[in-house]
Amino acid sequence: MKKLKLKRIVAVALTAVMTFTLLACGATTEALVDDQAAVRGMDEGVGEIWIDDEAIALAGSAASSQAAQDACRAVLGLMNQRREAQGLPAMAWSDALTNAAQVRANEITTSFSHTRPNGSAFWTVDSNVQYGENLAKLYQSADSVFTAWMNSPTHAANILDGGYRTVGIAICQTGDGSWYWAQEFGY
């Protein structure tokens, strides 16, 4: 419990430093992962049920190229290879988390943040299944986004969290062909 609290304090401090650094340096058009992975607090949303049915319904109708779908499955394969090497169980694909990931991938094309455009937390797409989130933009392959996530301590921590057993990954492709990634984790 103390270790988890310390981890959250360090994560918040790193987020603040990275946010100020990004603001000082200006926006970028290069591929990047978000400033920090998101984790839902243990007491966050207890007793509350959030399901954004309208957004999930729209996400289910979103078109995605076969290449994007294949890239999402390839990331799952890379994750499970790394988890196996660390002695962790494989993650299972979750359609519910994939629907939430598609909503989030769509949303981050206009607001690249773990806060949704309506101001609510990432996990309010479907609070029954969402407990962690990794975001990235402008990576055009499974290998490149996975490498970026693994090079970020907080993103790697989500991928290698032994408590997470399910994952959903989605890509939103914009009109110019850019890929926006969302990876949602559950228990």
Image: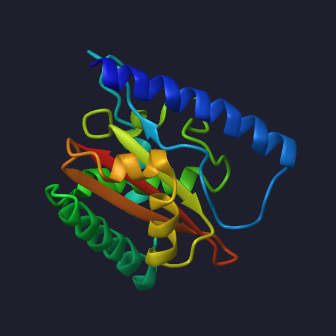
With respect to residue 146, does 159 lie above or below? Answer: above
Does residue 22 appear in this view? yes
* Residue located farthest toward the bottom when viewing the structure as drawn: 67
Identify the residue shown where x is 28% and y is 45%: 161
Q: Determine the residue positioned at 85% across, 49% down.
A: 26
Image quadrant holding the C terminus, namely top left
Give the vertical position of 154 relative to 124 (above or below).
below
In terms of image quadrants, where is residue 66?
bottom left
Residue 27: image location, x then y, percent = 81, 53
Q: State the image coordinates of residue 141 (x, y, percent, origin top left).
A: 50, 79
From the viewer's perspective, is 165 left or right of 125? left
Residue pictured at 61% horizontal, 45% vertical: 35
Side (left or right) of 159 relative to 95: right
**Quarter occupied by the N terminus:** top left
Q: Position of residue 152 (x, y in %)?
A: 51, 53
Q: How many numbered callouts? A: 0
Residue 100 appears in view? no
Q: Position of residue 105 (x, y in %)?
A: 51, 56
In the foreground, 168 or 164: 164
Identified at 77% across, 35% down, the residue is 20
